[in-house]
Image (tube, rainbow, N blue to C red):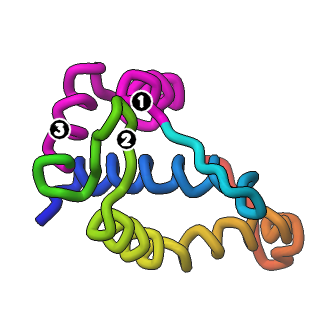
């Protein structure tokens, strides 16, 4: 069972792998990432307010729980990890879609009954 911190780390890793491999869908290639490179990427994103050691510990825990595999100094998701990532992604997909639709339609400009008030 994943706690919230480990679910977030698994989601970030799963999304990172999915997005980076999109450009290789028609080729027999897959991008791989080392733990150090992934930790640097997470730190640069600023999504989590953790230090490198804490991110490393979260990666170690999801590896111990068999959600990820660290082989030849490269991180990858196991079948269990891929399944968990898809479940997490499926759970938040409606919210992401709603945010995209709101941002794309510029709903705030079209709301005729919205009023601005002084606080």
Q: Which residue is mark 3?
A: 60
Q: Earlier in the sequence, mark 3 or mark 2?
A: 3
Was residue 49 drawn as part of the magenta stretch in this picture? Answer: yes
Instruction: Using the image, tell me which numbered label, if any, was put on residue 23.
Output: none
Q: Earlier in the sequence, mark 2 or mark 1?
A: 1
Q: Is the residue under label 2 in contact with that under label 3 (CB below 8 Å)?
A: no
The residue stretch that appears in magenta: 33-62
Q: Give the prevailing secondary structure in the magenta stretch.
A: helix
Between residues 97 and 2, which one lies in front from this camera angle?
A: 2
Count the labels in the image: 3
Q: Is residue 118 above or below residue 111?
A: above
Q: Is residue 71 above or below residue 56?
A: below
Was residue 5 drawn as part of the magenta stretch in this picture? Answer: no
Tell me where residue 59 appears, x and y as whole percent.
24, 39
Q: Which residue is mark 2?
A: 75
Q: How busy is the neighbourhood of tag 1: few (under 14 within 10 Å), some, or many (20 plus)?
A: some
Q: How busy is the neighbourhood of tag 3: few (under 14 within 10 Å), some, or many (20 plus)?
A: some
Q: Is the residue under label 1 in contact with that under label 2 (CB below 8 Å)?
A: yes
Q: Which residue is mark 1?
A: 34
């Amino acid at each position: 069972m994943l706690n919230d911190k480990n679910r977030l780390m698994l989601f970030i890793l799963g999304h990172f792998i999915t997005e980076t491999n999109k450009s290789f869908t028609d080729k027999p290639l897959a991008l791989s990432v080392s733990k150090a490179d992934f930790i640097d990427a997470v730190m640069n994103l600023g999504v989590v307010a953790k230090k490198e050691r804490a991110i490393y510990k979260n990666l170690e825990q999801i590896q111990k729980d068999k959600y990820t595999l660290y082989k030849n100094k490269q991180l990858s998701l196991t079948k269990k990890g891929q399944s968990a990532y898809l479940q997490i992604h499926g759970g938040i997909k409606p919210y992401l879609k709603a945010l995209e639709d709101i941002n794309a339609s510029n709903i705030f400009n079209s709301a005729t009954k919205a009023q601005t008030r002084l606080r």
